[in-house]
Amino acid sequence: MRLSLILQAAKSGRQLLVSCESQATGH
């Protein structure tokens, strides 16, 4: 597995999580 690929996936996943959280809290 490529490290850059894992990093990219983790970054996008985190962004998705943050957007979902902000939507749930209504910020």
Image (cartoon, rainbow, N blue to C red):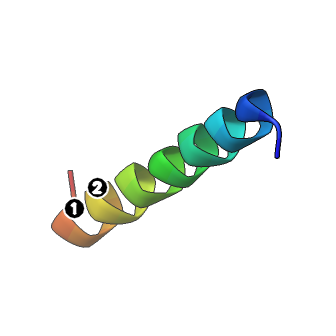
Q: Are marks 1 and 2 in contact (CB under 8 Å)?
A: yes
Which of 15/10 is in front? 10
Q: Residue extending furthest top?
A: 4
Which amino acid lies under the numbered mark 1 shown in the image of this protein? Gly
Instruction: Residue under label 2, please give it.
Output: 22
Spatial CA distance of label 1 from label 2 is 6 Å
Q: Is residue 10 above or below residue 24?
A: above
Residue at x 52% of width, y 55% of height: 16
| Location of residue 2 in the rendering, given as x and y in whole percent from the top left corner | 82, 36
Q: Is residue 9 left or right of residue 26?
A: right
| Structural crowding at the residue carrying mark 1, measured as other residues with C-alpha within 10 Å and reported as few (<14), some (14–19) or many (≥20) | few
| Location of residue 21 in the rendering, given as x and y in whole percent from the top left corner | 29, 62
Which amino acid lies under the numbered mark 2 shown in the image of this protein? Ser
| Structural crowding at the residue carrying mark 2, measured as other residues with C-alpha within 10 Å and reported as few (<14), some (14–19) or many (≥20) | few
Secondary structure of residue under mark 1: loop
Q: Is residue 11 left or right of residue 8?
A: left
Secondary structure of residue under mark 2: helix
Instruction: Residue under label 1, please give it.
Output: 26
Q: Is residue 5 above or below residue 1?
A: above
| Location of residue 27 in the rendering, given as x and y in whole percent from the top left corner | 20, 50
Residue at x 50% of width, y 45% of height: 15
Residue at x 79% of width, y 38% of height: 5
